[in-house]
Image (cartoon, helix red, strand yellow):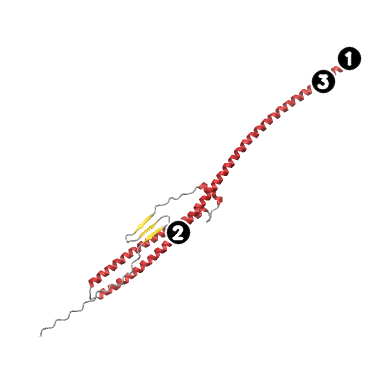
Amino acid sequence: MVSERNKARAKAQKDESVIVALSNDLAKASSDRDELQRINLLLETNIVLGRFELQGVSNNLIRTSADLEKSRAEARAAAEAAQAEMQKRDSKINELEQENTTLEKQSNELTGAITGLEKAIVETEKKLAASEGDKEFLVKELKRLQAEKAELERRFNDLAELRKQVSQLKEELSIARRMEWIKKGIFGFSESKGGAMLVQGTRSTNPKPSTTSATNMGLQAEVRSDGSATIATPKPAQAPAPATPPPTPAPAPAPTAPK
């Protein structure tokens, strides 16, 4: 009887120990489950935040790509405009060179006309000095030749001033072209510099009003700051031939004395 009680008591103690151990295991498992649920919730939150961040990065990438494409398009447009402007300036420089050549030819023609007038004046002065005929006519002719020579000299000076203005405008255009080359970098343009050009911005040029110069001797010239020039001048007068004085009338016969 006592032995059975002892066995029952031992079995009860053993069962109680098993129950306590199982209870501890259950508590630990419940704690582990709660920890795993907390970690799972944290991971899900991180995933959601990561998706939002990824969406933001994707949107930024789309905007950046659009801005980059826009910058490239603007850079290409600016490069084409700059190239067209440089070609336009080159064309204007060529036009100015042709105008300068024309002015030089007209200047040479005026020089020849002045030289012819000088010879005519010298010849008239010689005839005047040696003439015993109509000196009044020769004096008038000499004054006319001198006045015509002075007029041609004034026109020659006007042409010289106009050539100076054309040369100055050509030099300004050449300097602007060289500055444009330097701005583009070593006389060329690279599309990879489009972003830098976008940051720097494009410079718009305001056309200057055209300048018209006219002389009081019939020479009309219009020189515009965009490089074009229009010149209208009458052809130089040819040197007149030396005037021929009227023939000296023969002396009247002496009257015959009455017989």
Amino acid identity at mark 3 = Asp
Label 1 – label 3 distance at C-alpha: 20 Å
The residue to which callout 3 is attached is 15
Label 2 – label 1 distance at C-alpha: 133 Å
Precedes in sequence: disc 1 or disc 3: 1
The quadrant of the image that shows the C terminus is bottom left
Precedes in sequence: disc 3 or disc 2: 3
Amino acid identity at mark 1 = Val
Few, some or many C-alpha atoms within 10 Å of disc 1 (few <14, some 14-19, many ≥20)?
Answer: few
Q: Nearer the viewer, mark 2 or mark 1?
A: 2
**Quadrant of res 93:** bottom left
Q: Is mark 2 on a helix, strand or loop?
A: helix
The residue to which callout 2 is attached is 93
Q: Can you name the residue that lies furthest to the bottom here?
A: 259
Q: Residue at x 45, y 56 (%)?
A: 173
Q: Can you name the residue that lies furthest to the top here?
A: 1
